[in-house]
């Protein structure tokens, strides 16, 4: 809170300390939405500049980290909404590596670390059927094992809204994956 | 366990959060039911790719901090300009009225005194021969008789 107050009073070193201390957290949130470094950095920079202008609204009831997480989530969602809509899921777009990965894992093999890029590409492919908000909810709950309450705090949505989003997203992603598996 | 129930279970919770007994029930049923097996496999693969995606993290570069601080300073500089403009807008009326007053005073001080104005009757009477000679103002002007007597008294004195 002291750090926030000092930064609000125009103390540049306090603001610099906030950036230094919370950059990893803000990058972590932005990484959920973007895979390109340039986009993650753009989002993170916008988050800190926005946070500085909104320091007056930070009343110290929660942690700075929680407050920044919420700003980061909303900033990334706005950036995605402003960007072009991603293409629909198409099986024909599957690369050989992706098809091979699906074959192996579907056959019971454990996914290896070397193939994590392929798995991440596939994740982006199935996540593209969701709205950015639903993606966020599903990635946090199913990807990071976050609780409903944690997602609600990070996004500002109610817990029931998070539950609805997660259910809807999980169902859509499962159906998209089924589609991919059936058309191999 | 019917198909509907398994699919509901799969959509309601992440596979990772299912208890051992729940998972066992789902797997047992999936072996017997083709459509549920497809759903289960898809859910299992989805969970794997989502966890892989969630682990993808980009760390801040060493230059990020410098970049943000530079952008912050730039933002501060941009925000200070409108503040000056707002100050100027509020002070503009006062400053312009002061400028007009100064100009008017300058005109009154330097231009008007140089101009010659025609004498009014009152001014002419104040500058009459008697006033000039006697060094008296118009308020205590002498009557005609007094003037004559004064003149002749002076003449008598001279004699």
Image (tube, grey):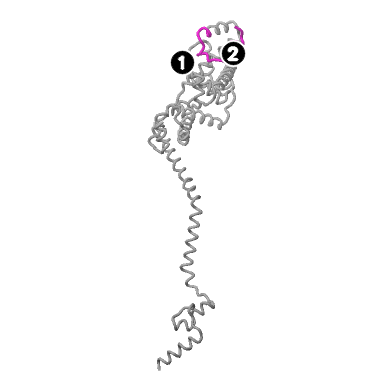
Where, quadrant-wise, is the C terminus of chain B in this rendering?
bottom left
> For the residues carrying marks 1 and 2, which lies nearer the camera in this image?
2
Which of the two residues, B70 or B85, is positioned nearer the viewer here? Answer: B85
Q: Is residue A4 visible?
A: yes
Whether discs 1 and 2 lie on one chain: the answer is no
Residue drawn at 50 percent across, 53 percent down: B92
User: Residue B80: which quarter of the image?
Assistant: top left
Q: Which residue is mark 1?
A: A112
Dot 2: chain letter:
B
Where, quadrant-wise, is the N terminus of chain B in this rendering?
top right
Q: Mostly what secondary structure, the magenta segment?
A: helix
Dot 1: chain letter:
A
> Quick check: B142 above or below A5?
below
**Residue A141's x, y, as percent?**
51, 19
Q: Is residue B62 left or right of residue B32?
A: left
Which of the two residues, A122 or A9, is positioned nearer the viewer here? Answer: A9
Residue B8: image tag: 2
Q: Which residues are magenta?
A: B1-23
**Residue B153's x, y, as percent?**
44, 90
**Residue A22's x, y, as percent?**
42, 29
Mark 2 surroundings: few (<14), some (14-19) or many (≥20) residues within 10 A: few
Q: Residue furthest left?
A: A13
> Quick check: A73 above or below B159?
above
Q: Is residue A104 visible?
A: no
Which of the two residues, B120 or B130, is positioned nearer the viewer here? Answer: B130
């Amino acid at each position: 809170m002291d750090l926030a107050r000092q930064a609000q009073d125009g103390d540049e070193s306090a603001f610099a300390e906030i950036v230094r201390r919370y950059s990893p957290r803000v990058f972590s949130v932005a990484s959920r939405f973007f895979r390109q470094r340039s986009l993650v950095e753009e989002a993170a920079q916008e988050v800190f500049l926005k946070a500085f202008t909104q320091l007056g609204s930070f009343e110290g009831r929660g942690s700075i980290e929680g407050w920044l997480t919420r700003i980061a989530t909303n900033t990334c969602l706005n950036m995605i909404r402003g960007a072009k809509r991603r293409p629909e899921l198409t099986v024909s777009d599957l690369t050989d590596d992706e098809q091979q990965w699906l074959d192996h894992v579907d056959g019971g093999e454990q996914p290896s670390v070397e193939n994590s890029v392929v798995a991440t590409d596939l994740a982006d492919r199935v996540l593209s059927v969701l709205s950015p908000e639903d993606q966020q909810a599903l990635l946090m709950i199913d990807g990071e094992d976050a609780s409903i309450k944690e997602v609600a705090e990070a996004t500002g949505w109610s817990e029931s809204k998070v539950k609805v989003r997660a259910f809807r997203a999980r169902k859509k992603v499962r159906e998209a994956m089924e589609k991919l598996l059936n058309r191999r | 366990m019917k198909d509907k129930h398994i699919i509901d279970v799969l959509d309601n919770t992440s596979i990772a959060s299912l208890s051992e007994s729940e998972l066992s029930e789902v797997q047992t049923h999936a072996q017997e039911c083709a459509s549920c097996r497809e759903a289960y496999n898809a859910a299992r693969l989805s969970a794997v790719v989502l966890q892989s995606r969630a682990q993808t993290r980009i760390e801040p570069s060493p230059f990020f901090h410098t970049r943000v601080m530079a952008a912050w300073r730039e933002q501060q500089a941009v925000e200070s300009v409108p503040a000056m403009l707002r100050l100027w807008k509020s002070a503009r009326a006062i400053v312009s009225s002061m400028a007009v007053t100064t100009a008017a005073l300058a005109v009154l001080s330097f231009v008007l005194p140089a101009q010659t104005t025609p004498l009014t009757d009152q001014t002419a009477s104040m500058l009459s021969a008697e006033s000039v000679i006697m060094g008296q103002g118009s308020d205590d002007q002498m009557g005609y008789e007094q003037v004559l007597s004064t003149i002749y008294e002076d003449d008598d004195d001279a004699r």
